[in-house]
Image (spheres, helix red, strand yellow):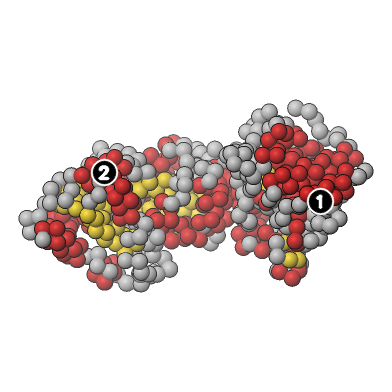
Amino acid sequence: MEKISLRDVLAKKLVELGGKNEQVVVLDADLATSTKVDEFAKAFPERFFEVGIAEQNMVGMAAGLATLGFIPFTSSFACFTAKRALDQIRITVAQPKLNVKLLGAYTGLFTGKTGKTHQSVQDIAIMRTMPNMRVVAPGDAIEMSSVLEAVIEYVGPVYIRIPRDPISVFLPKDYKFQWGKPITIKEGRDLTLISTGEFTEKAIEVAAELEKEFVHAKVIHLPSLKPIDEDAIAQIALESSCIITIENHNILGGLGGAIAEIVSERSPTLIKRIGIKDVFGESASNEDLLNKYGLSTESIKKTCLDLLNKIKR
Amino acid sequence: MKDLNEVSTKKLYEIANEIRKIALKMIYTAGAGHPGGSLSIAEIIAVLYFREMRIDPKNPKWEERDRLVLSKGHAAPALYAALAMRGFFEEKYLMTFDSIDSILQGHPDMTKTPGVDMSTGSLGQGLSAGIGMALGAKLLNKDFKTYVILGDGECEEGQVWEAAMSASKYKLDNLIAIIDYNNVQLVGNILDVMPLEPFSQKWESFGWNSIIIDGHDVESIIHALELAKKSCGKPTVIIARTIKGKGVSFMEGKYQWHSKAPNSEEFELAMSELESFK
């Protein structure tokens, strides 16, 4: 499968959207060449604001611009957007429901060997608990493009998770992102894998490996972490012997937490959460991080098989 | 819209006194609020809302209106008093301040109160939002002004200085910051908590025009605003020397009155002092 960087899609799509809509403006906190919003800066220099290493001021400025009808995108890493500027997001963006789009780049453990400071394993949990905020983690290039169209169409604050490294394209070309909707990537009746963002690529790999053991896993991709179509999740749970959630995030409060909240209230089913187990990361290659933190395809496959054996007993 | 440019200074002092009385009554009625910092900005609010600002109370979302961000959101009672007196909402709402379902929240909420241009309350954030508005005005070729009222203690927040840098980078001569320099914050005197001086020089070194005035002198406020509006290529800060709790003798200069509602005796005494204003 072809691998495409979601940052490259962001770069192109923002220029396209900026061309169609003069209200689109971009603010950056000294990371434009990393998030790739520098493409927007080249295309529309008058609508690009480099505010320097000052995320809090950037978010406040975006809020002020939004009150005038602009659609500001703020560019920074996920770790800084969701935490350094958190109170500013709470006070001047989320509560007044202003139309600010918060880009959180370099998600989970994959930050190019920058380690614990730059890894973002709490942003989903933080943003999900913010009233008025929508949270989305696109899974591939096709979805990234569709998500950005939906983000512009929706009037209100959105937090968008953007992974650093290229991802295999798994969605069809005519795919359209819908808020809240889980997407069935593969059918299977033995167990259900639910994943989000860049880790759906991994869930698909795990499912393929499980097939070799004659275990048929259903794969559900859930890009919209808020809102979530609770009826759809409850129905999936009803049809599943067990659920395994897979995310590049802390197992507390993220995708696994969200699924557990819904399923436990609506149709209790055994859930195993796979993700970062409430620890800080470290600087290393993606492969070494996956191996050490129990997130390799092999490790997740083993967790799935162990769970199935446990159920059978 | 009535042209208020000719409102006399005498009238503005009366309005400021009325703002004090209403604010204090709101705080007393609610049994909560911030009297010290509400009383210290009464003249500033009076001049802005009754003379300077281009606003239309019947059309609070008018696109051409001047914007005001009360960054020191805890002084909301003074703002609400002025908004009601200007007719943004009926005066009957004033005494619902801080009660359930009220349009008048303890700290400003732009989604609930007509005439409030930005939600604030967590200190240090309003200037950034004001910069976004001023920058947006430039992009849209609109000539409205953006006013931001900050507290002195709030300038201890780093974000204020991030904002100060960016306002001069973008040459926001349509942005006017007014600092209520009453020398007192929640736990004590500014000088003991975290000295701000040399304050004016700090702003100047960040690329701002800085004007120091007596913040209770209506003519000085008017004059400073006139100067600020004439600025070309630079934002202006008006450092208004004020007295916390101004107008109520036993509250003046006392940090203990930062966020405390008066009891009935204190309220009666305070009101009688304000009633005797001439």
Seen at 47% across and 44% down, the residue is A132
Distance from label 1 to label 2 (Cα)? Answer: 60 Å
Seen at 22% across and 47% down, the residue is A237
Residue A125 position by quadrant: bottom left
Asked if marks 1 and 2 fall on the same chain, the answer is no
Q: Residue furthest right?
A: B278
**Residue B194 in picture, x, y percent from top left:** 70, 69
**Residue A269 in picture, x, y percent from top left:** 22, 51
**Camera-side residue of B115 and A25:** B115
**Camera-side residue of A52 and A179:** A179
**Residue B204 in picture, x, y percent from top left:** 73, 60
- Pointer 1 residue: B265
Q: Is residue B220 visible?
A: no
Q: Chain of mark 1?
A: B
Looking at the image, residue A169 sits to the left or right of residue B184; the answer is left
Q: Amino acid at mark 2?
A: Ala
Looking at the image, residue A275 sits to the left or right of residue B142; the answer is left
- Pointer 2 residue: A234
Seen at 67% across and 39% down, the residue is B96
**Camera-side residue of A79 and A243:** A243
Q: Mark 1 packing: few (<14 Cα in 10 Å), some, or many (20+)?
A: few
Q: Give above or below for A292 relative to A268.
A: below
Q: Quadrant of the C terminus of chain A?
A: bottom left
